[in-house]
């Protein structure tokens, strides 16, 4: 739906650009949300991008557009943009977005921009730049509505009418004391329903959730999701209110964290690599593949160790892939369940015994089922009862051990403060490969007696 | 942090329960958010759960708690709960939550509850039950603030003071015509800053985003995230406003969809299986493992086909795992990137050529690197130059083919309207296994001439 609409838009904008139909273009550009324009930009030449950009009348929309440009398009685009123009746009944007944007400029240009911005704005931005990127301080907006506890509802509404034009989430008002300490919160809704002369302290909610500037962004997001709130106040180490994190940023955090987790589980780094060069993507993937390569080489030595048995009973070789594959796959299932369970707060270390024994049970049942299935293939192909028994025992062992290791490792990694999403992939797979191969040959040499 | 706090809470609640310190317990229970209580409930006996539940004075908090109970705890808990009690709680809850909750009761009990609820409420709930679960209709709340376009700002504020007490997102007011068609939206913020006598039509935003009752919930969520709005209006097929979807539900949708995608990619079904029985979990995992078992058996036949060459050159066997493993792992990386890219809207079918050729390039580079590495192990171990060349060629082929297949398949599945997250896992792995094995033996027989 969304895609179709964008396609139609791209086509008509291109047609109008060819015909140089400026007034038509202006109408379309100013009617389209900047978030949509940013997608269309991808399919346009740099020249046309600039042409359209300058047709946008609302500087706020220009800011949103700038913010949505990806890391490939952004540097080229801003290179030709006038500094005063950039400053004018940035002054209209929420300060947290400015802080995100400013670090994408070359250092020198960024400094010039900050110098040219009005004092108050650039101080706020530089303040934000001091916080770590993935903490509450790094994602908060320093614009909020703060009032004293003796303010009346009527005065509060009047102050809304006079100032606070550029506050991002104007639905909560925060009540502070003289030291800027947070005393309570009031929703705009409450404000309009109480008698006008009521002082804020009489109806503010004083039992409020807040975070500190160094709270991890994932913690912040979980808090907002858990209590269904629209914004959470951020206080500094002296308990003074310094900003708020709004729900729209929380959505972005959850989406980003989910993507990160998925990528990490496949050894693809933390950042989406769409916009990365081939060289950089290759580099990101190298270590994970290296770990599994080491696992494969270890498996190589194990098979080599049993080479003489193998050459006597060549019929053992064809079963290597299926035994390793079944172990590897169920191991991935078990570790995925546990990694995601930990990420969403369903599991923690104290559930270790419960989780691992359940996975072990599932692994064993599936091991019996697939052990029998693969043994019947063996029986049909080779008609050697001892081989069939060996194969089924090996499948069973491999699958139950894999489920055990796959569920155990992420738990232990978490306990050791190692991110389970990063560690489990190649680690679990390699261990399982090695264990599977070793058990297979050990079992066959014992049973068949080669 | 959160976990520690909960642990302390559980411990003190347990201690107080043992001492039967009712007044103490009451104080704690009424000070704790119901979302936190639900976690504590997991570690308490049914008897104690009821005891605490009845200590909660705020029916709204009781409702939140009920809603947070998982599918194991819920049936037991509500079994002993008085119907009138349930009805009283449900009447305080947002209607979308009631609709979600009511389907968790046994059919008969649900009917009795709906009968006993006040007419208006139960009509609304039954209306919601008519929509499919994962559409805008299924997740919307039917409570919103609707006014006519000639209402003045002052009248609007007065109506807020008189009614609309139980509206979930009281920050937007919707302007409707006589046929209940949506004309525009006003934020509470706008309402308090305009002169009191201004009619709504003079300052409402009439160019608004909306969805229809059958819009997929993921589409709704993307819309809210894209335009940073707090609630999106839902209209029926006659364009009448019937509900709104609020941002807190959008957060839940994103988290759920991410979990679903992760689980599907590992063949674990769509639902988190923590609360499922061992038998049910086993059943969910069977088909995915079956697909990879079939792949393994095919690989078995391929190796068997080359059995005579293999018995002559037994040194070929130890390389089977590492060649298959490297192909499998890079294939997983490529398909993960593409599946997640599609899910987050970064890729669509028109990017096919670009995406696949990039992955192919990365696969080839990595194939050369690891081909050389594994060939040097071969050379050191067997000192046969032709074997080393065969092995490196096989690794290179396997890895580039894997990257190609891994990136191609999810694209094609999407085009065919098959969910790529479900399909790629076992499908891609099996194809890659088979291709790798076949190429390996084909290359060695050609090069070494066995």
Image (spheres, coloured by chain):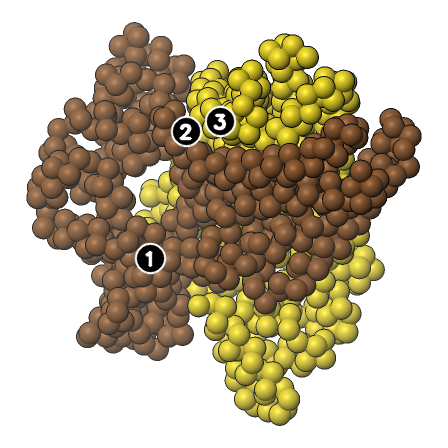
Chain colours: A yellow, B brown
Total count of labels: 3
Q: Is residue A184 above or below residue B56?
A: below
Counting from the top left corner in percent of width and height, residue B3 is at 48, 25
Q: Are marks 1 and 2 in contact (CB under 8 Å)?
A: no
Q: Chain of mark 1?
A: B
Q: Residue at (30%, 61%) from the top-left corner? A: B213
Q: Residue at (45%, 30%) from the top-left corner? A: A346
Q: Nearer the viewer, mark 1 or mark 2?
A: 2
Residue A376 image label = 3
Residue B136 image label = 1
Q: Chain of mark 2?
A: B
Residue B282 image label = 2
Q: Nearer the viewer, mark 3 or mark 2?
A: 3
Q: Residue at (22%, 61%) from the top-left corner? A: B159
- Helix, strand or loop at mark 2: helix
Instruction: Indicate the quadrant containing the C terminus of chain A: top left, top right, bottom left or bottom right.
Output: top right
Counting from the top left corner in percent of width and height, residue B191 is at 35, 65
């Amino acid at each position: 739906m969304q895609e179709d609409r964008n396609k139609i838009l791209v086509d008509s904008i291109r047609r109008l650009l060819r015909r140089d139909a400026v007034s038509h273009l202006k109408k379309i550009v100013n009617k389209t949300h900047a978030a949509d324009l940013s997608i269309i930009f991808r399919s346009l030449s740099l020249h046309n991008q600039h042409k359209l950009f300058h047709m946008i009348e609302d500087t706020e929309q220009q800011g949103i557009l700038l913010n949505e440009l990806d890391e490939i398009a952004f540097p080229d685009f801003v290179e030709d943009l006038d500094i005063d123009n950039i400053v004018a746009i940035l002054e209209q944007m929420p300060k947290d977005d400015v802080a995100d944007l400013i670090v994408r400029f070359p250092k020198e240009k960024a400094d010039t921009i900050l110098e040219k911005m009005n004092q108050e704005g650039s101080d706020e931005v530089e303040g934000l730049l001091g916080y770590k990127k993935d903490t509450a301080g790094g994602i908060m907006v320093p614009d909020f509505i703060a009032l004293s506890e003796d303010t009346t509802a009527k005065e509060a509404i009047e102050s809304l009418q006079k100032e606070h034009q550029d506050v991002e989430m104007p639905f909560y008002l925060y009540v502070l004391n003289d030291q800027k300490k947070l005393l309570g919160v009031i929703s705009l809704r409450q404000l309009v329903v109480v008698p006008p002369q009521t002082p804020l302290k009489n109806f503010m909610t004083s039992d409020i959730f807040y975070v500190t500037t160094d709270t991890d962004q994932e913690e912040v997001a979980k808090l907002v999701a858990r209590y269904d709130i629209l914004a959470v106040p951020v206080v500094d180490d002296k308990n003074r209110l310094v900003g708020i994190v709004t729900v729209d940023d929380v959505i972005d955090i959850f989406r980003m964290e989910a993507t990160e987790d998925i990528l990490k589980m496949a050894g693809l780094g933390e950042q989406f690599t769409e916009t990365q060069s081939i060289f950089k993507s290759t580099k990101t993937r190298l270590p994970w593949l290296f770990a599994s390569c080491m696992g494969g080489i270890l498996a190589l030595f194990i098979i080599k160790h049993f080479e003489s048995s193998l050459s006597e009973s060549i019929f053992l070789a064809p079963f290597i892939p299926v035994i390793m594959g079944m172990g590897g796959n169920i191991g991935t299932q078990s570790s995925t369940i546990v990694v995601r369970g930990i990420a969403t707060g369903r599991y923690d270390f104290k559930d270790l015994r419960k989780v691992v024994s359940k996975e072990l049970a599932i692994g064993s049942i599936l091991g019996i089922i697939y052990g029998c299935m693969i043994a019947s293939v063996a029986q049909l192909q080779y008609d050697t009862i001892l081989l069939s028994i060996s194969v089924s025992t090996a499948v069973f062992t491999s699958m139950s051990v894999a489920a055990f290791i796959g569920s155990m490792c992420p738990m232990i990694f978490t306990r050791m403060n190692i991110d389970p999403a990063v560690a489990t992939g190649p680690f679990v797979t390699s261990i399982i490969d090695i264990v599977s191969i070793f058990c297979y040959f050990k079992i066959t040499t014992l049973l068949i007696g080669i």
